[in-house]
């Protein structure tokens, strides 16, 4: 049975009060045409008329060898084993865990148990995070840290209850812990269902098909401001700052919600990858282009922005507005009152966090010697497997026309040949999420595997 | 449906009859001395087929809310018990399918039922609890001291029951309620079978091994190297041969002499997907095995565990149960599409 015929399973984790039940009910309501089975923990409270709901005690079964990657969830094996005994299979299974659940055994159940693995495919791990409380929880409990570390999608919920600065800061902290996960902000767990279901996160082909990289982008800009503007000419004013120049992309018709900002950011990442055009003070900034503002002159510098039709203008700037005291004015207006921001957000860490759990990426051009790579990964997983929660990657193997893709959960490891490299540049990308990763050592060891 | 009647069995399996139930068939057992075959499906339907013709004699539907989980015929063949996700155990008359008695054990699933050899007692599990009832379905004893959901039960004597769960097998005297023995092993035990004399306890484990103990000597052993978990186990009538699943191959351990420690087991190879059901014929060294590929094979075994196929047939889906008629001269099997087949065995 290939993965397409298997019933997809999404795991919903998150601390008590993070909004799991709200999200579950939302999915059941929006996907009411589908046959969805929900396996809830004993404290779950989904309405029973919404589909098949099965309550299960969380029974974590360790194996006699003591290996943590062999630890599975006995309750899931039992319940799923029963669910597969239907002629009309379910379309989807949702597993809600308690806030204290370790996601490792849940995920491992789908790889360690051949019977479950032959009928069900783990689609993804979705972790809900209560924006108001996670900061304290991350410090205090291993479970919440591991739930973040294992996630394919992190839903940053209850963002209406905290300031936008602290959300930005929290987001950068979570992103540093898990660079593989997609981060979505929400209020009352209101996220589009397609952001949490049918992710194919454990299906290597599918995951790379949808996103050509396992890494969430690191944005080359730190700040976005959105202004609502009538047609006219505007002055962008900057004071002296830490650098003599600054990159910027101006986007017309920029939406103000989180999704729109993120879409804008994705688009601007690509603009930033293009060569920049130097703009001197007094000159106009063209929309949709990567520009480099020349800021070496002393005192405030002014650049011109022209708007033809009423529009929301988004500015994606290399540094924060604060650093250069960025302000926007109507050109020629009598009173110099800055135009208020419609929305703003910051994109990168404002300061380093010292979380034990973090993610690292190795990105290198060139070909890997498979024997050396195997030897290194076996040694790494044998010694550090307990501390490596998840890994994903693709590598270019010397003498192989096809790409190799792999993933792992603790010491479980799955590698396969993927598509032909063809004309695409051969390169390697490995992402690890784990506790106390020795980044420098791992990079050095990987480099030693290169031809 | 038409393809079900076109089965062309090979070898010792001679064409009998075929039928169909409403959903995934989970259990089939012979009743009334082999005159009737009872088949239960997951939706909670039970059909009684005439053992010779395959004609449906009576038919029950929706007897357990949620799902039917298990069905067991009383040793005298006249009564049968069913249990399901609704927490109920119900007794029925095999002749007409009329309900005789019932008991609700709790809100959890009732996954396992087992009659003692004399038929005096019926044991059932409900989540972490084990109940023993008399033949009228009245509770006589219960045990709540299991650390995880009970994964298997079996009678070691007529008044002593073995209970398997995570990390251990415990034995209880159901007359005085005492714990008589505890065998511990750190692992998730997913299946259990006892030798007919109750001395050998074999358990399939989640870590793809079979663990067994000899109660009389306290000796225990582990047989590892299975590619999957051995969910299906069967002992022959003499207690010499232990057949185990956990792979496409049936592995047969022989307890002859000093075995099976230090001996090589028999490997029965014919199925192309993992074994999903096993049953030894009564009073004979014949084994029937069913697999996820829909194949059913009858094997003749020697006392050292080696053997070969004597007949085979193909069903349409995963074989969920195989059952020998009490006289050993017919074999029935059911599958995941609700298919039912019975063959004469020569």
Image (cartoon, rainbow, N blue to C red):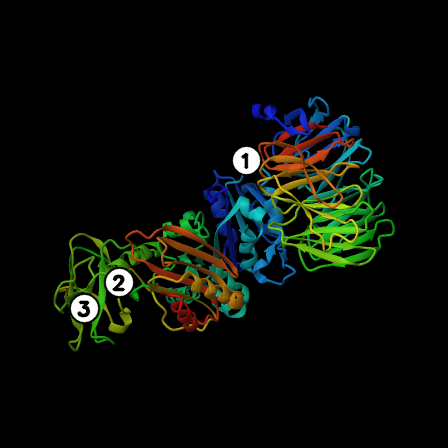
Residue found at x 45% / y 72%:
A438
Mark 3 crowdedness (10 Å alpha carbons): few <14, some 14-19, many ≥20: many
Mark 2 crowdedness (10 Å alpha carbons): few <14, some 14-19, many ≥20: many
Residue found at x 59% / y 62%:
A67
Q: Is residue A266 above or below residue A83?
A: below
Q: Which residue is mark 2?
A: A316
Q: Is residue A224 above or below residue B292?
A: below
Q: Is residue A159 visible to the viewer in this orientation of the structure?
A: yes
Residue in front for this viewpoint, B302 or B327: B302
Q: Is residue B242 above or below residue A333?
A: above
Residue in front for this viewpoint, A262 or A133: A262
Q: Which residue is mark 3?
A: A293
Mark 1 crowdedness (10 Å alpha carbons): few <14, some 14-19, many ≥20: few
Residue situated furthest right in the rendering? B176
Name the quarter where the C terminus of chain B is drawn.
top right
Marks 1 and 2 sit apart, C-alpha to C-alpha, by 51 Å
Q: Position of residue A174 (x, y in %)?
A: 43, 64
Indicate the secondary structure of the residue bearing disc 1. Answer: loop
- Say which of marks 1 and 3 sits in front: 1
How many labels, in total? 3
Instruction: Tell which subunit mark 3 falls on.
Output: A
Work out whether mark 1 precedes mark 2 in sequence or the reverse, and give the earlier one.
1
Q: Which residue is mark 1?
A: A88
Marks 1 and 3 sit apart, C-alpha to C-alpha, by 62 Å
Instruction: Check contact, mark 3 vs mark 2: CB within 8 A.
Output: no
Task: Indicate left or right for A300 with A131 as reference.
Answer: left
């Amino acid at each position: 049975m290939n993965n397409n015929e298997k019933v997809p399973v999404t795991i919903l984790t998150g601390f008590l009060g993070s909004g799991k039940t709200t999200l579950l009910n939302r999915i059941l309501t929006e996907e009411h045409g589908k046959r969805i089975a929900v396996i809830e923990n004993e404290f779950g409270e989904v309405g029973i008329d919404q589909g098949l709901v099965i309550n299960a005690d969380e029974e974590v079964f360790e194996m006699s060898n003591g290996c943590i990657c062999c630890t599975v969830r006995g309750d899931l094996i039992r319940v799923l084993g029963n669910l597969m005994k239907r002629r009309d299979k379910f379309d989807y299974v949702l597993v809600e865990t308690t806030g204290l659940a370790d996601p490792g055994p849940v995920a491992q159940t789908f790889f360690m148990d051949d019977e479950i693995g032959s009928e069900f495919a783990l689609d993804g791990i979705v972790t809900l995070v209560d924006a108001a409380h996670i900061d304290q929880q991350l410090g205090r409990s291993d479970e919440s840290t591991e739930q973040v570390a294992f996630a394919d999608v992190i839903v940053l919920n209850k963002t209406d209850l905290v300031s936008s600065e602290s959300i930005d800061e929290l987001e950068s902290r979570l992103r540093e812990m898990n660079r593989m996960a997609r981060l979505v902000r929400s209020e009352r767990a209101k996220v589009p269902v397609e952001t949490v279901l049918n992710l194919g996160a454990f299906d290597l082909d599918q995951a790379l098909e949808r996103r050509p990289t396992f890494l969430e982008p690191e944005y080359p800009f730190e700040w976005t401001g959105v202004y609502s503007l009538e047609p006219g000419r505007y002055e962008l004013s900057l004071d002296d700052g830490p650098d003599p120049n600054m990159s910027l992309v101006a986007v017309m018709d920029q939406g103000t919600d989180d999704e729109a900002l993120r879409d804008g950011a994705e688009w601007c990442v690509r603009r930033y990858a293009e060569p920049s055009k130097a703009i001197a003070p007094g000159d106009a900034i063209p929309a949709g282009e990567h520009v480099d503002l020349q800021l070496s002159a002393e005192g405030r510098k002014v650049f011109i922005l022209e708007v033809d039709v009423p529009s929301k203008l988004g500015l994606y700037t290399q540094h924060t507005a604060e650093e250069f005291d960025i302000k926007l004015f109507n050109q020629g207006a009598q009173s110099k009152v800055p135009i208020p921001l419609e929305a703003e957000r910051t994109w990168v860490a404002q300061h380093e966090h010292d979380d034990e759990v973090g993610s690292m990426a190795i990105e290198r051009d060139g070909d890997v010697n498979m024997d050396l790579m195997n030897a290194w990964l076996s040694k790494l997983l044998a010694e550090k497997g307990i501390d490596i929660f998840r890994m994903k990657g693709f590598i270019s193997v010397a003498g192989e026309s096809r790409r190799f893709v792999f993933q792992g959960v603790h010491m479980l490891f799955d590698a396969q040949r993927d598509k032909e490299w063809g004309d695409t540049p051969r390169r390697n990308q490995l992402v690890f999420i784990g506790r106390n990763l020795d980044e420098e050592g791992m990079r050095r060891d990987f480099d030693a595997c290169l031809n | 449906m038409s393809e079900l009647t076109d089965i062309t069995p090979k070898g010792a399996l001679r064409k009998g009859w075929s039928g169909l139930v409403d959903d995934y068939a989970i259990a089939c057992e012979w009743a009334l001395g082999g005159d009737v075959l009872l088949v239960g499906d997951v939706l909670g339907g039970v059909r009684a087929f005439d053992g010779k013709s395959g004609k449906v004699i009576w038919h029950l539907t929706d007897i357990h809310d949620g799902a039917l989980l298990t069905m067991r015929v009383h040793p005298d063949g006249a009564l049968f018990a069913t249990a399901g996700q609704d927490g109920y155990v119900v007794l029925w008359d095999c002749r007409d399918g009329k309900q005789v008695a019932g008991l609700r054990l709790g809100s959890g699933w009732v996954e396992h039922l087992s009659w003692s050899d004399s038929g005096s007692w019926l044991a059932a599990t409900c989540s972490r609890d084990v109940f023993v009832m008399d033949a009228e379905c009245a509770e006589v004893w219960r045990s709540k001291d299991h650390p995880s959901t009970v994964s298997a039960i079996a009678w070691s004597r007529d008044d002593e029951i073995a209970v398997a769960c995570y990390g251990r097998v415990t034995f209880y005297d159901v007359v005085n309620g005492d714990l008589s023995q505890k065998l511990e092993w750190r692992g998730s035990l997913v299946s259990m079978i006892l030798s007919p004399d109750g001395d050998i306890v074999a358990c399939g484990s989640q870590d793809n091994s079979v663990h067994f103990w000899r109660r009389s000597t306290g000796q225990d052993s582990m047989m590892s190297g299975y590619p999957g978990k051995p969910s299906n186990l069967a002992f022959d009538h003499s207690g010499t041969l232990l057949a185990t699943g956990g792979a496409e191959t049936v592995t047969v351990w022989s307890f002859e002499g000093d075995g099976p420690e230090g001996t090589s087991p028999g490997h029965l190879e014919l199925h192309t997907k993992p074994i999903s059901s096993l049953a030894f014929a009564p009073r004979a060294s014949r084994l029937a095995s069913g697999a996820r590929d829909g194949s059913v094979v009858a094997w003749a075994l020697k006392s050292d565990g080696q053997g070969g196929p004597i007949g085979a047939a193909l069903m349409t889906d995963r074989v969920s149960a195989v059952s020998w008629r009490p006289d050993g001269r017919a074999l029935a099997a059911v599958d995941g599409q609700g298919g039912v087949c019975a063959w004469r065995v020569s």
